[in-house]
Amino acid sequence: MIEIPKSTFYYRPNNKDKLKEDSDLQDRIEAIALDFPRYGYRRITRQLKREGWSVNHKRVLRLMRESSLLVKPKKRWVKTTDSNHSYPVYPNLIKDKVITTINQVWLADITYIRILLGFVYLAVILDGFSRKVIGYCVSKSLDVQLTLRALKMAILQRPPLRGIIHHSDQ
């Protein structure tokens, strides 16, 4: 048989008509993106097809990426900490402290986890030195029992020594 590389079969020479068509398409994509700033490549592809362009969504995505026209998704931010309260605010005891052993500082935090049916809350107690989880609790409601159960689990797991610091952000 003919001994030529397979790539010869797939080779397509650079066509000036293709470059002109790409630049025309690029101009139209930019115009649509200016008119509809929240349109992503899928919507722009549909709009181009409605206008009679024979175009693939991958090509539109490539051209939009090259022109930095891709829409950046907005991230939802949920505020979970209320710093405006009447309760006492305690000083940060571990600000300049060097943690050298386990059971010297316990760190506590609460976060939420999105699940199919809504949210659940997670309270965690970590050892400051080893970063090991020593107590946790998951609950559907954010209440005192959530944090107390996590603390009780930590105490059962690792009985605290005298002088241990229990630190949380609030």
Image (tube, rainbow, N blue to C red):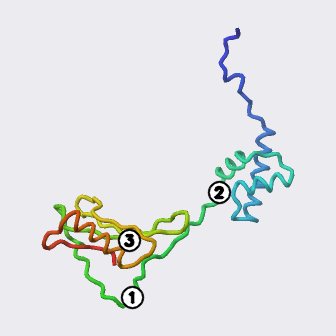
Q: Which residue sits at x=18%, y=61%? A: 102
Q: Are marks 2 and 1 in contact (CB under 8 Å)?
A: no
Q: CA distance from mark 2 to mark 1?
A: 42 Å
Tag 2, which secondary structure? loop
Q: Is residue 103 left or right of residue 50?
A: left
Q: Which residue sits at x=20%, y=64%? A: 158
Residue 123 at x, y = what percent?
A: 36, 69
**Is tag 2's residue or tag 1's residue first in the polypeptide sequence?**
2
10 w.r.t. 36: above or below: above
Q: Which residue sits at x=72%, y=23%? A: 9
Mark 3 Cα-neighbour bin, 10 Å: few <14, some 14–19, many ≥20: many
Mark 1 Cα-neighbour bin, 10 Å: few <14, some 14–19, many ≥20: few
Residue on which the image places disc 1: 85
Residue 65 at x, y = what percent?
A: 64, 51
- Most foreground residue, 146 or 10: 146
Residue on which the image places disc 3: 110
Q: Point out the image quarter for the C terminus.
A: bottom left
Q: Point out the image quarter for the N terminus.
A: top right
Q: Which residue sits at x=75%, y=45%? A: 56
**Is tag 3's residue or tag 1's residue first in the polypeptide sequence?**
1
Q: CA distance from mark 3 to mark 1?
A: 18 Å
Number of the front mark, 3 or 1: 3
Residue 70: give its label: 2
Tag 3, which secondary structure? strand
Q: Residue furthest left?
A: 162
Residue type highlighted by circle 2: Leu
Residue type highlighted by circle 1: His
